[in-house]
Every structure is written in structure tokens, then in C-alpha cells.
Image: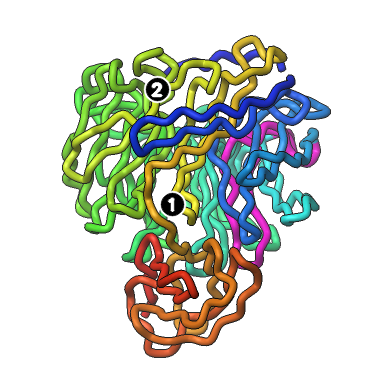
Amino acid sequence: MKMLRISCLTGGFLSLVLSLSAQTFTSLHSFDSNDGAHPYAAPIQGGDGNFYGTASAGGATGAGMAYRITPSGALLTLSFHGTNGDFPRAALDLATNGNFFGTTVMGGTNGGYGTIFKVSPNGALQTIYSFGDLDGASPEAALIQGTTGNFYGTTESGGSQCPGGCGTVFEITPGGVLTTLHTFDLTDGSGPYAALIQATDGNFYGTTAGGGAKEFGTVFKMTPSGTLTTLYSFSGQDGQFPAAGLVQGSDGNFYGTTAEGGLGYGIVFKITPGGTLTILHNFNGQDGANPYATWIQGSDGNFYGTTTEGGTNGDGVVFQMTPAGALTTLHNFDGADGTFPYGLVQATDGSFYGTTYEGGTSNACLYGCGTVYNLSVGLGPFVETIPTSGKVGAAVKILGTKLTGATSVTFNGTQVAFTIVSKSEITTTVPTGATTGNVQVTTPRGTLSSNVPFYVIP
């Protein structure tokens, strides 16, 4: 397992634009420890058009920050401290009620094993659960809101099935009532670092970084009631240490990465719902190394992701990959614009936002406190639904840009009444007669389609 450089924690701002053909890279913010340090996860887009994320360290107590950043780079922060959690490493999850939910790796009121919290868009923070080891410890991964309205997540350790705990899968209500759905026992996996996804079949899919039949990690499926099936156990040559989560492609298959294994620098793989795995790419160092973060499928159908190391300067890369496995390096980090990039999100204007764990212009941290950046590759705007699936009558948020003046919203062609909340948010419900397919919003500037189909639950 790679060990990250953990450095002391402050100040600077960088606005650097590099143009490479149709690509534009912009460094939006360099953390300076006072406003946070060492962000692990990319920020997510909120209903107000701003972006919300976490930094694992820094702030008044050094225990990390939640932050809001505008598309132009203006930052507002909220500090963590002990009882409300320490070291938030995971991305936030935007719930249908407009609040953000997240996890901290440590802290809380039950022995310091981590917390689950919610924070409002205006910064009001509330801890809703403190882990106590036997129910899980060190939740490294983001939460996801399932079709039940509850949240689902993993803890990297804890539980009762092996010494030190091999980790758990849990469900928690918005009010803080937690149910442990599965406790890993090493034979079926250990160390689930990454977030789950809920697939179109209603089941959850995820990875464990270790354990399994060959002890190099697994891919698993779990029913909403907690029945777990191991779909694949890695052996090393086909990858090891799958620290990142999965993404379900538009073809119904799942795509993921292992941080190590293969030729030694990690791999990209495709796996069918039945467990047949295909290696799409072996990183070789020059085109990237150690992809620790979950990647995404962009609105153009290609996949986009990061490697924490490798590339021209050894500081990591942003890459694009076709579903067939053809890889293109989009950006090589150089330290000043960041190093150790972890993950991407695609904003509804078509561009990508991400963070780097280190690097930037601040000298408050030994290797830099990390950055937030924007990368545009020329993709057009779209709309995003929160959530991406639901039953008829379920509440749905539609995020976008320049939505003021919208005249029509359809779910795969079925019209529905809607409310324009702001230029970046519409609220509606799944209409009677709706079927699975794209959501479309007609605006004075044209029709915007959702980046993924909305799955209508029978």
C-alpha cells in the first residue's frame, strides 16, 4: 500500500490557465492550512451552482474543513474538531432535502472511531452518528442516498469478524439510526475504502482493498437487505488493492481501477454484473501510476479519472479513456498546480472539477497543502438529477446552468410539472407513466439532457 507524505500545514492563491488544444486547465485555489489542507475528494456541485467539499486537515484545530467554493475560486470554510469529527476525507453527498452528508475518519463521541455528519448549504453542521468500533470504524468513503431515502456507506475497519476489524457496510437514516448490513470477515474482503454505488438492478456494488480468496481485494454485490456475494477476487497480476469504487457504464457493465498490480502501476478493468473481468489498461508510469480515486463516465460516454503519481513529472495525471480502453493523458501535474490528484466530478457546464492532495503555491505544508482545479475539454452543458433513480411520485432535484425561463421538463418524453428554484436548480417529482430514460429540460437556449438515464423503479 502506498504511504502518502503527511506534512505540516498555509497561504496562497493560484490562477493559472494552460491551453492545450481544446483543453483548458485552471487552478482555482491553493489551500494554505488556515483554510484547509490535503483534500482527498473532489467537490460536488450544489443546488446553488457552487461546489462543496472537504479537506482532510487544516483549519483552526488541524482536524479538517468542509468548504464551499464558487466556480471562480472564492472559498468559504467550516472547521471540524474532535467531538464533531476529525479528518473528513470523503466527498460529500447532496441529499434530496438540500443538505450535504459526509463522514470523518476519526473523532466523535464514542471512542474516536469516526462520524457521520450533515451540513446545510449555509454551513450549519450536525453530527448524526458516532461509530464505536464494533459497528464500524474509520469511514473513508462517501455516503450515497439510496432509493429508500436512507444513506449507505462503508467503514474501512471495525466490526467483529477479524482482529482489528475488516470493515462493514451500513445503512443510516437521515435522522441518524444506523443498521449494520454486513461485516467483512477477510474471506469475503477486507478494508472497503470506497463508496458504494446502487446499480439499475437495485443492488449495491463495491470493492474491498484487501481480502478475498487471493487476499488482493474483491468486487462485491450486496442486496439492500445485506446479502453479499463476492463477484471477483484479484490475484495481483490482474490488479491488487482496488481502493476506488465502481461506476456503472451506460452499457450496464461496471468499470473500476486497482491502485497497484498488473505491471505494477495499477490497472483499469471492466466487470460484468455476473463477475467476468476484463483488463482494459495497464498503467506504465509514463501514462500515470496508482489510480486511487473512483473515476466517472462523462457526458460524452468516455471515462475520466486521475492517477496519484506518474506522468511526465511524476506528480499524477488526468486521463480520458474510451469504453474500449484507449487512453489519452489530458493533464500532467507539475507540483505548482498540484500533486497527488484524487478524483473528478463533472459539473453541469460540461467541465470537470478536482482536487490534489498536495502541491500548490502555499509553503505552509512541506509539499504544499493541495489545490482545487477546473479542467475543460470542450464538452457542452447538461442537467443532473438528484437522485438518479426513483419511484413515481418521488422528489427529484435537477441541477444545471442557466435554467431560468425553462418551459418544459420530461422524463423519457413524459411531461411533468416543475418549480424553478434558481438559475441552477429545478425541483419536480417522477411523473405517472414515466419510463427509464433521459430527463430533458427545455430552456430558451435549447434543450438540456441528463448526463445519465433516470431509472424509474417499478
Q: Which residue is drawn at 54% across and 64% down?
A: 399
> From this viewpoint, which residue is outermost toward the bottom?
432
Pick whichever, 104 or 353, lies toward us: 353
- Local crowd size for mark 1, using a 10 Å CA cut-off: few (<14), some (14–19), many (≥20): many
In what quadrant of the picture does the N terminus appear? Answer: top left
Q: Residue at x 21, y 45 (%)?
A: 323
In what quadrant of the picture does the C terminus appear? Answer: bottom left
The stretch of residues the image draws in magenta is 83-112
Mark 1 lies on residue: 350
Q: Is residue 109 visible?
A: no
Pick whichever, 330 or 130, lies toward us: 330
Q: Residue at x 20, y 51 (%)?
A: 272
Q: Is residue 320 left or right of residue 395?
A: left
- Report the amino acid beneath label 2: Asn
User: Picture quarter containing residue 328?
Assistant: top left
Residue 253 screen position, x and y as percent: 24, 53
Q: In this view, does 59 lie to the left or right of 361?
A: right
- Label 1 sits on a secondary structure element that is loop
- First of labels 1, 2 by sequence position: 2
Task: Please say if 310 is above or below 438.
Answer: above
- Label 2 sits on a secondary structure element that is strand
Q: Residue 103 in magenta? A: yes
Task: Please say if 214 is above or below 102.
Answer: above
Q: For the residues marked 1 and 2, what is the alpha-carbon distance in whole angstroms?
A: 20 Å
Residue 405 screen position, x and y as percent: 57, 77
Mark 2 lies on residue: 332
- Report the amino acid beneath label 1: Gly
